[in-house]
Amino acid sequence: MTVETLKVLVVDDEPGMRQGAARVLSRHAQSLPDLDVEVRFAVETAADAAEALARLEAGPWDLLLLDYKLPDRTGLEVLDEIRTRGLDVVTVMVTAYASLEVAVSATKNGAFDFLAKPFTPDELKSVVEKAARTVLAHRRALALAEEKRQVRFQFIRVLAHELKAPLGVVDSYLRMVQDRALGDELAAYDRPVERALARLDGMRRMIVDLLDLTRLESGQKSRDLAAVDVVEEARGGLEGVTAAAAARGIALALHAPDALPMRADRGELGIVFNNLLTNAVKYNRDGGRIDLTLRPRDGGGAVIEVRDTGLGMAAADVARLFGEFVRIKNEQTKGIEGTGLGLSILRKLAELYGGEVAVASEPGVGTTFTVSLADAPEGTQP
């Protein structure tokens, strides 16, 4: 449980009243288990409106206990001044002249709550607890808004960086064709056109991956949950990489029972197998091997293991592997294309099935991905 300290200003022209309230709050610590926080109070006092407004201007303050009747102006006038100056503080109006009319006026002028004199220490603590909750909720809302702003900025910055390079390549190739830089023979432009199309395909894959990622994170991805044979889906995944693997002499092997049923979305399993097997081919060595192993998961579901004999990774690279737009870049991988989103999507899918993804890797030896997926429960289909 974290500890947060709120700054409180007690404004009252009666010395005994303001000192008593300050003493009670200074010694009080309020536990708020639902917010996982313990609130403490740093209290100062003021005897009139002028002193209160000067202190508030010098702020910041979190809570204001404001007497309704002060020597130089009323509490309502102080509230109006607080609003005019744009001061951010949660105010509790305190008065011996308790009436519905005063309470309504105070609320209209921006007061959070109302406390009538005389009050007990418990009554004071109770109203301050409610005000503290409001302050903390406001703080967290601001922090969350700032976090979202930073995440959005970082996302756009990285996305712009990832799209800038392929767009530059496509632009370069198109200008080469436009300027007839390679002469008038059409065949001379076959390679630039192929490379431009490959870059466009890469950007298209990135867009698809981004859509998958945002749908997963927002919970808006439609799901068709049914009984699915994981072995059948695995065979489909292997067929999808057979040509790429054969071109590099990479052997593919499936180790699985005759059938492995689970409740899942067929398309989501396809994404899992596609990401695992595509990476296993891309980051493998020529003449290498990929072993895809399936087994039942305790309690229902499936465990999917993909082992390759590829480049492998250092422990530091494994630790950052599932970040968005992360691609492990070194001399061995610099020519390998990808969006850097596949493994992030894989992890989110595993979490959607109450599972996880584990990675074991050794540079120069290979990498093993193990994905655990539980049966999707009944009733989870949107």
Image (cartoon, rainbow, N blue to C red):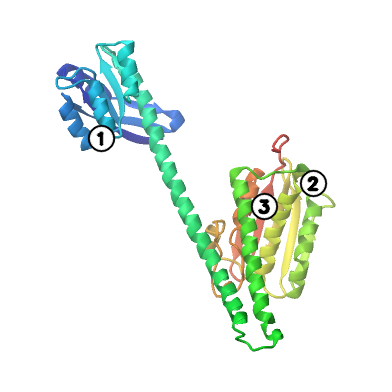
Measured from the top left, where is residue 17 in percent x and y? 20, 17
| Residue hosting label 2 | 228
For disc 3, the neighbor class at 10 Å (few under 14, some 14 to 19, many from 20) is many
| Horizontal relation, residue 121 to residue 69: left or right | right
Label 2: few (<14), some or many (≥20) within 10 Å? some
- Please identify the quadrant where the C terminus is shown: top right
Q: Nearer the viewer, residue 84 or 220?
A: 84
Query: Of marks 2 and 3, which one's residue comes earlier in the chain?
Result: 2
Measure how far apart labels 1 and 2 are at the Cα level.
64 Å
Residue type beneath disc 3 = Val
* Residue highlighted by disc 3: 371
Instruction: Name the residue nearer the viewer: 162 or 167.
Output: 167
Residue displayed at 17% across by 17% down: 16
Q: Secondary structure at mark 1?
A: helix
351 or 364: nearer the viewer: 351
205 relative to 194, above or below: above
Q: Is residue 71 above or below residue 153?
A: above
Q: Give the distance between the C-alpha atoms of the residues marked 3 and 1, in whole angstroms.
A: 57 Å
Q: Which residue is mark 1?
A: 85
Q: Is residue 306 visible?
A: no
Check disc 2 and give the amino acid type. Answer: Val
**Residue type indicated by callout 1:** Arg
Q: Quadrant of the N terminus?
A: top left
